[in-house]
Structure formats: structure tokens, C-alpha cells
Amino acid sequence: MEKERSFLSVRQAAKVSSLSPRFLYEKCQKRKLRYYKVGKRIVIDREDLTAFLTQEPVEPVNNWAEELRLK
């Protein structure tokens, strides 16, 4: 059975991700974030938003001395 997709408007996506709508529009325009056009509206699949947000994780530094060595 196919999973039901959940689409968000750019404003909704901005709200759930704590990012600005302008930032999301820019990422859509640059084709960094997958989106769909429904008439003039842009909608973003919730799974695509999650994939975008988790594509470049930053690993924590174990302690402050190690952090200083990295600089």
C-alpha cells in the first residue's frame, strides 16, 4: 500500500522548520529543495523538507580543547 504524502505550503514549511519563507523560496528557486507547483502555488513534501534539513549534519566537538585545535 502506498504511503499518503503530506504537503506543506512554504509558510507552513517555514513554521515547522523554523526557517524563513524567503530562505525556503530561495532554496526552491536554486533547486536545492524539491518542490511541486500547483497552479501558482509552491508546495513541499514533508519528507523532502526533512531530507533537506538533515542532509548536512554537523558533528559535535567532544570538548573545548579539541575545538580550539580545529581552529
Image (cartoon, rainbow, N blue to C red):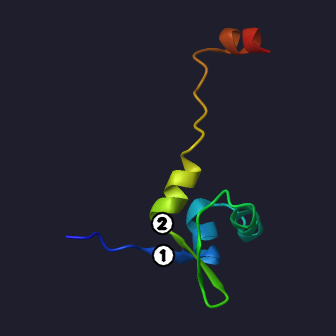
- The three-letter amino acid code for the residue at tag 2 is Arg
Image-quadrant location for residue 67: top right
Q: Identify the residue at image location x=61%, y=33%.
A: 58
Residue furthest out toward the bottom: 39
Q: Quadrant of the N terminus?
A: bottom left
Name above or below for residue 39 compared with residue 25. Answer: below
**Precedes in sequence: disc 2 or disc 1:** 1
Q: Identify the residue at image location x=69%, y=9%.
A: 65
Q: Identify the residue at image location x=74%, y=13%.
A: 70
- The three-letter amino acid code for the residue at tag 1 is Phe
Residue position marked by numbered label 2 in the rendering: 46
Image-quadrant location for residue 23: bottom right
> Residue 50: x percent and y percent?
50, 56
Residue furthest out toward the right: 71
> Along the horizontal axis of the image, is 19 left or right of 60?
right
Q: Residues within 10 Å of mark 1 (few under 14, many from 20)?
A: some
Quick check: marks 2 and 1 in contact, CB under 8 Å?
yes
> Residue 63: x percent and y percent?
62, 14
**Helix, strand or loop under label 2:** helix
Query: Which label number is shown at residue 32?
Result: none
Q: Quadrant of the C terminus?
A: top right
> Residue 27: x percent and y percent?
71, 61
Name above or below for residue 26 compared with residue 69. Answer: below
Image-quadrant location for residue 25: bottom right
Could you say which is closer to the camera, residue 28 or residue 60? Answer: 28
Residue position marked by numbered label 1 in the rendering: 7
